[in-house]
Image: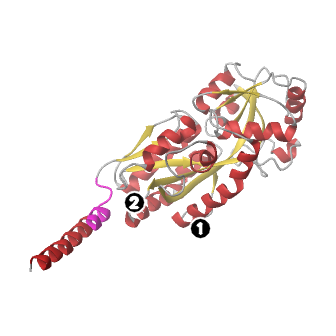
Amino acid sequence: MQTRRKFLGSIAGLMGASAAKQAAAESYPSRPVTMIVPFPAGGPTDTVGRIFAEAMRSSLGQPVIVENAPGAAGSLGTERVAFATPDGYTIGLGNTVTHVLNGAIYPLKYDVVKNFEPVSLLVNEPVMIVVKQGLPVDNLAGLIGWLKARPDSALAGTGGAGTVSDIVAAFFEKRTGSRLQHVPYRGLGPAIQALMAGQVDLVMSLLANTLPQVRAGTIKALAVTSSSPLVGAPDIPTVDSAGLVGFYQSNWHALFVPKGTTGPVIANLNKAVTAALANPEVHKRLVDIGQDFFRAEQLTPEALAAFQRAEIEQRWPIVKAIGIKAE
């Protein structure tokens, strides 16, 4: 009799916990949501994150508060998301670095796939090759010639070891036969500030905080690493038209949540993302900072999971072959 009471009590407890969990999912979110951006404020990932955080508020009915947690090419902030409570109140802004490249470069305490649930792809952007105003080159061919005449002397600012800017610079060296001195900063924002001040010669930069400076004339853009011109800046040459055919490099952004987050919570967040992308004002803001967009069918959690797996299969062998390691 005692055993039967215990069994029935256990069943009742499980049913109660399940009902409470379901009720919490249905009322989600009932308080502000924190978006962890694992890079410094003012950088390209931060800019993208703040646009989406603001736009998602109307769908969620709660503020989405951006919290910057930079360090180790985004792995410190991403670790916080990996081990956060899986209740939907901590979401992570990820990108090519945090959820692909870092897995091949850093000895992480988490797995870039297994410790997360995918929510949605957000936007994609090529890399822009930019130089300081005083550099005596006007096009990409001129830059390559200038670099080859000065091996190991040109300073390439990066967002830190293992970031997109650092890895693309390494790919660029291998492709062109040039040799650069990589100067790591705590994010691309500080690297671009250094370029504007003339402290470094060039940066392989993401567009979100670079394009406004190019338009303002404080730095020079030589090419974008895509096969088609930017919608928001069609006058900037592609690498194909600039003579470095096929040197395509990009960085995507996506939302992830901790493993174990429930399906209804993920669905709510996904719905907020798609609503944000459908907003004409948000679309314009993203175009203005050089972002490209994914097709509607690519905006599901399942599509993000498949996309991430494909990126890992493509990029990890390249990173390991070049021998890029965490410093």
- The answer to whether any part of residue 205 appears in the image is no
Look at the numbered disc 2 and give the secondary structure of its residue.
loop
Q: Is residue 220 above or below residue 315?
A: above
- Label 2 crowd bin: few (<14), some (14–19), many (20+), radius 10 Å: some
Where does the N terminus fall, quadrant-wise? bottom left
Mark 1 residue type = Glu
Picture coordinates of residue 35, whole percent (x, y): 43, 45
Query: Which residue has dot 1 on it?
Result: 297
The residue lying toward the viewer, choosing from 5 and 179, is 5
Residue 195: image x %, image y %?
69, 24
Decide whether residue 209 is among the magenta residues.
Answer: no
- Please name whichever residue, 313 or 302, is drawn nearer the observer in this view of the structure: 313
Q: Identify the residue at image location x=67%, y=36%.
A: 211
Residue at 89% x, 43% y is 243
| Residue 246 appears in the picture as rendered | yes
Q: Give the SS element for disc 1.
A: helix
For marks 2 and 1, the one nearer the N-term is 2
Spot occupied by residue 206 in the image (x, y as percentages of width and height): 66, 40
Look at the image and tell me in which quarter the C terminus lies. Answer: top right
The label on residue 261 is 2
Check contact, mark 2 vs mark 1: CB within 8 A. Answer: no
Q: Position of residue 48 (x, y in %)?
A: 54, 44
**Range shown magenta:** 21-30
Is the stretch drawn in magenta largely helix, strand or loop? helix
